[in-house]
Image (tube, rainbow, N blue to C red):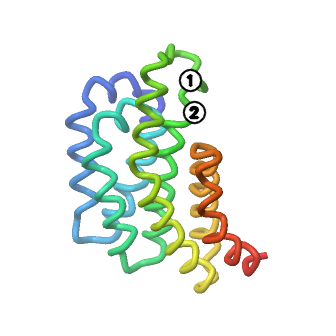
Amino acid sequence: MISEACAKIIKKNIDEIFALVFNGLQDEHARVRYQALACLGLILNDTSPDLQNKFHATLMPQLFKMMHGEELIKLKAQVVSTTCSFVNGLMHLEDDEETEVTPKQKEDAKTIIDLYSQALVENISALFNLAIEKQYAPLQEETLALLNNLAESLKEKFAAYYSTFIPGMKQML
């Protein structure tokens, strides 16, 4: 609620706020990392595409690192949820009635998604298989949501990845 109500203030102080949240992503305690991811997801939703445009080069490598390195499956699900907020904020620029979206902003958003699409698909594939293996529904839901966003964004290019996910989807069904 704070993030949504204070979005303009957060945008003005985005550097400081991102630094605080980013430090939380690297904390040694799992609960701090979990809450930092939850906070980041909300801020990504409320400040998109500003945070994505400014910090993608710092943020995405950290999220990929967490997808691989986190031990707790609950944290992996939260990482995917945060990543979904990242991608979703870039894809749905037109949904914000208060902000006029320029063609350059749309092109920048597409460029950022394209930049990370291959790594996203690879990471999602591994996490989707883990979610099916462990029968952990929250991770399954988050990977499918992110997969949906990527498929929507990549359009025809996503066809190359169908064979990666179809066996898992069949198994899940």
Res 169 quadrant in image? bottom right
Name the residue carrying label 2.
92
Where disc 1 sits, the SS reads loop
What residue is rendered at 47% in x and 62% in y? 78
What residue is rendered at 38% in x and 63% in y? 34
Would you say 138 lies left or right of 87 here? Answer: right
x and y, in percent, of residue 67 in the image: 39, 68
Q: Nearer the viewer, residue 17 or 101?
A: 101
Would you say 137 lies left or right of 45 here? Answer: right
Count how many numbered circles sit on residues in the image: 2
Q: Amino acid at mark 1?
A: Asp
Would you say 113 lies left or right of 17 here? Answer: right
Which residue of the protein is positioned furthest toward the right in this rendering?
A: 173
Q: Amino acid at mark 2?
A: His
x and y, in percent, of residue 129 in the image: 57, 78
Name the residue carrying label 1.
96
Would you say 47 lies left or right of 20 here? Answer: right
* Circles 2 and 1 in contact, beta carbons < 8 Å: yes
In the rendered image, the vertical position of residue 114 relative to residue 26, given as above or below: above
Res 140 quadrant in image? bottom right
Q: CA distance from mark 2 to mark 1?
A: 8 Å
What residue is rendered at 26% in x and 42% in y? 18
Q: Quadrant of the C terminus?
A: bottom right
Res 108 quadrant in image? top left
Q: Nearer the viewer, residue 39 or 153?
A: 153
Q: Nearer the viewer, residue 81 or 127?
A: 127
x and y, in percent, of residue 51 in the image: 35, 35
Which residue of the protein is positioned furthest toward the bottom in this rendering?
A: 133
